[in-house]
Image (cartoon, rainbow, N blue to C red):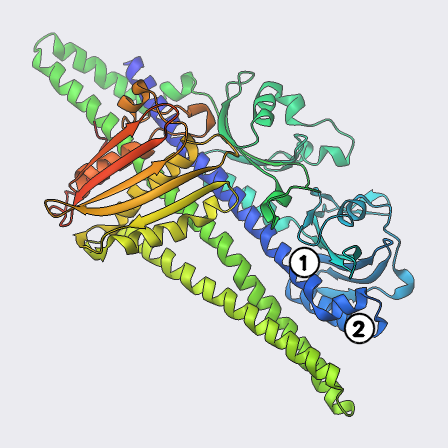
Amino acid sequence: MHGFFLAQAQLERERRIASVTSTVHRTADLVGAILAAHANDVRILAALMPVRNFAAGDDSARAGVIRIFSAFVEQKPVIAQLRYLDAAGWERVRVDGVDGKITVVPVDELQDKSDRYYFRNAIHLPPTEIYVSPVDLNVEHGVVDDPWNPMPRLARTIPGPDGRALGIVIVNIRADEMIREVDRGGRDGDGEIQWLNGDGYWLAGAPRDKLWGFMFGRDTTMAKIRPTAWARIFANRGDGVTVGTDDGVTYIHRSVTPAAVLSETGSDEGAAADWKFVGTIPAVGLADLWTPRHIGFAVAGLVLLAALSLAWSRSVVARHRAEAREAAAAQELIMVERLASLGGLVAGVAHELNTPIGNAVTVASTIGERIKDFRAEAEAGPLRRASLDAFLSDVGDGAALMLRGLDRTARLIQQFKQVAVDQTSQQRRRFRIADTVQDVLGTLGPQFKHTAIRIESEVGTDALLDSYPGPLGQVVMNLVNNARVHAFAPGAAGVIRIAARSTAGNRIEITVADDGAGMPEEVRRRAFEPFFTTRLGEGGSGLGLSIVHNIVAGVLGGSVDIASEPGTGTIFTVSIPCVAPAEPESGRIYNVGS
């Protein structure tokens, strides 16, 4: 009986690992999306003509820069401060936003910031890079603000004709929204979610006395309090699951280098230290095994044992009941995994939509300001040809940027809408495999955007399927993600190829192949077993391929095979009929396969 409860507790622990892993990745993606939106603000500001003219020495452009900066701060209350610093580090324009009030700092109150770390680090970056400072608490006159005001700073240089920086545009962002996402992940998930900097100091998700230790001279770091767990987390710059032997807690972590994520070139020059997003799950203890619910089961078990002495047949009933409980737990785990997959897609799409929508809003606001300036100039007297040309250029460039962004948004929403509807409804309909593959690739794009892994596709058939595009899309996504996680070492380059063709017997064959590490025979034989994974300590849950097997064999009425050897890559081959079998019984899609 105790062993059965232990098995139940382990199944519950695996479910929580899958759930917390999804929450950690979603939280990291959302925080990254917030940062990316503000990085685009900096890119746009540094590219605007009035700002560039002012940086080049045209003092008459200062009023236009102030209007643009004020409009940004007014529309985005999360911006605490927006500045332009010249090449010597002097503030030339500064607009503050405090409690909804916009303040333009007078010229005689502007300060020399040449000795501040963020200026020294940002001024030497190429104009293609965004500088991201560490997240810290705002300090005024040597004292930390109370209540705390955490913020990162983002900056971009404005290049001169010789390529050297004329100055930088720098924005201070309140980190409250990022911290709320971390706290929300901890409240809504199955474990605590924490945000740490590269030195192990807690930024969010910990008791107040542990937060921001470096701002107060306190050595309250995970390296000090949980040394074994931190050593393992710090050694792994990617994602993973770490069992902390110093306290028995399981840690799910993801590392993010902000400047590398925002970089247009893949460089992390001038980057702040890694951010660590960490989820925690307590170890399975005696209390997990013998809860009041379990005590009731234990009493029932004793009665059952008494009955076994009278009839051996009761043992068969007891065994079947135990198997049913384990199967129900396994079904719940696989449902969590599928929902986690859709949750990851939502975070990725939100990240991608933030950029074009944010650009469109910002450019529309800027065009509105330029129209006001142009109207005022026209009413003041004769227009100069240069003013008209500059106005038309700014408006034309802005309109083009908005159209590109909104077109990208429309296409991405259309792709995601189809995938999301199919995923949640499991609707049977007629479709072409090329459309499903294209929708899935469009939705998976954000997960590969900042990796060296390339995805190629070749659909060599236009056959019409009468089947389930949602489950089929889930199969393709799981196989691609399996290759991303298992086939390639962190940071390694590689290729994942998706192909489809018609075969005899009115069937479709889909292959997902990679040129990665491959599998030894003992791994290949067990690949479809539920909970079997070679990456349990590094982010694998052991459910992805089990889900693939069940969907293909159950819902789609087909088969899936693996061809792989160490060092030669892996090929998954899925063969399904063009006409799926009759609708499966409710819940069959989640049953664990052999």
Which residue appears at 49% of the width and 67% of the height? 406
**Residue most toward the right?**
108
Indicate the position of residue 192 as horizontal and vertical percent values.
Answer: 52, 34
Identify residue type, mark 2. Answer: Ala
- Residue neighbourhood size for the residue with mark 2, other residues' Cα within 10 Å, grouped as few (<14), some (14–19), many (≥20): some
Indicate the position of residue 346 as horizontal and vertical percent values.
Answer: 43, 50
Which residue appears at 51% of the width and 70% of the height? 403
Asked which secondary structure carries label 1, the reply is helix
Identify residue type, mark 1. Answer: Val
The answer for how far apart the CA atoms under marks 2 and 1 are is 18 Å
Above or below residue 546? Residue 156 is below
Image quadrant assignment for residue 361: bottom right
Which residue appears at 33% of the width and 44% of the height? 498
Is 129 placed left or right of 467 in the picture? right
Numbered tag placed on residue 61 in the rendering = 2
Label 1 sits on residue? 42
Image quadrant assignment for residue 69: bottom right
Above or below residue 79? Residue 397 is below
Asked if residue 587 can be seen in this view, the reply is no
Is 65 placed left or right of 283 in the picture? right
Indicate the position of residue 146 as horizontal and vertical percent values.
Answer: 76, 46
Most foreground residue, 378 or 172: 378
Most foreground residue, 559 or 229: 559
Quadrant of the image containing the C terminus: top left
Asked if residue 166 can be seen in this view, the reply is yes
Above or below residue 175? Residue 398 is below
Indicate the position of residue 21 as horizontal and vertical percent values.
Answer: 45, 35
